[in-house]
Amino acid sequence: MRDRVIARRPPSRLRGGGLRQAGAAAVLALLLTGAGSASAGAEPDGEKIYQRCFACHSVERNRTGPRHCGLNGRAAGSVEGYNYSKAMRNSHIVWNKETLDAFLANPRAAVPGTIMAYAGVKKESERAALVDWLLALPPCE
Amino acid sequence: MSESQIIVPASAEIPTLRRRSFLTGLGGLTLSAAAVAMLAGKESLAAGTSGNAEADVNILAGALAAEQEAIAAYQLGAESGLLQKPVLDLAVTFQGHHKEHADVLASTISKLGGKPAKAKSSYDFPVEKLKSQRDVLEFAAGLEKGAVSAYLGAVPLFDNRDLATAAASILGDEAMHWAVLRQALGLAPVPSAFVS
């Protein structure tokens, strides 16, 4: 999915050749893959990665984004009391390892029209840890 | 602190877009340029504005909602009776920054043809877990760290690069909040060379 998006709309700085562009590409690749993060070389911790979501989400409460308890097996756009985008309500997604991984890799490509304005968790190992942690959350009380 | 919610004086409203105003040709472009200048605080940035303003408004709407919740969270902390000076002053100062962010985001959404949502009348915070100044600081630090990540995740999505630059400016402010709160908690204020 990510490859498709990059191919469709390459960053303007990377169009054309030259050393400067190559350097920019290298830096971009480093950052997008998370190689420069503090967790590089360590096993990603899904709960810690979830802290990135704290501005909008929590496990137990609907906030700017919907709550995440009971996520595993739930139909997208179905949390009671949360006002989803039409795109999410009509996505026909059921959250599991595959669908959540695809969504978190690039939310706006996975569900065009989603109001979740987040580029995604680009590093695969971090995304996998986050997916596992989210899907292991208990049902909502 | 005995109730599970904090009440703020504003009516809840779902963010919506006045799509028609995106379709008014030159008017949309003019509004976009003004919005960029306003958000970034630099009139010179208004030049050359174009692109998918509706998508940018959706990003700004999400940021506005998060800023409004942060304002309410700091209000909760300030009124909790748990914060002592100078931490209380710090919280009020940071709340003021979030108010400035929210004001400029709302104005920019309007200028771009969208309709900014008002703050919710109430927010559901984990009040039962806030029993000390440290609890409040940890809660605030978590929100600020999340805000840093949220802006980091939003910046590359802006079609308008000037809006991205302005959002990055807010990101910097949120990062400073997070660092100062960590310092107040006795933690390393800047725990790593990169944020994510």
Image (cartoon, grey):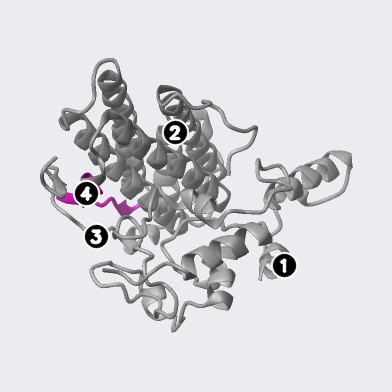
* Quadrant assignment for the N terminus of chain B: top left
Q: Earlier in the sequence, mark 4 or mark 2?
A: 4
The magenta segment: B113-127
SS for callout 4: loop
Q: Earlier in the sequence, mark 4 or mark 3?
A: 3
Q: Amino acid at mark 2?
A: Glu
Q: Are marks 3 and 2 on the same chain?
A: yes
Q: Which residue is mark 2?
A: B174
- Predominant secondary structure, magenta span: loop
Q: Which residue is mark 1?
A: A3
Where in the figure is residue A84, as x and y percent of width and height? 33, 69
Residue B66 seen in the current view? yes
**Dot 1: few (<14), some (14–19), or many (≥20) neighbours within 10 Å?**
few
Between circles 4 and 2, the one closer to the viewer is 2
Spatial CA span between label 3 and label 2: 25 Å
Q: Which residue is mark 3?
A: B14
Mark on residue B114? none
* Quadrant assignment for the C terminus of chain B: top right
Q: Are marks 1 and 3 on the same chain?
A: no
**A1 is higher (above) or lower (below) than B182:** below
Q: Are marks 4 and 1 on the same chain?
A: no
| Residue B74 colored in magenta in the image | no
**A95 is higher (above) or lower (below) than B125:** below
Quadrant in which residue B173 is drawn = top left
Tags 3 and 2 touching, CB below 8 Å:
no
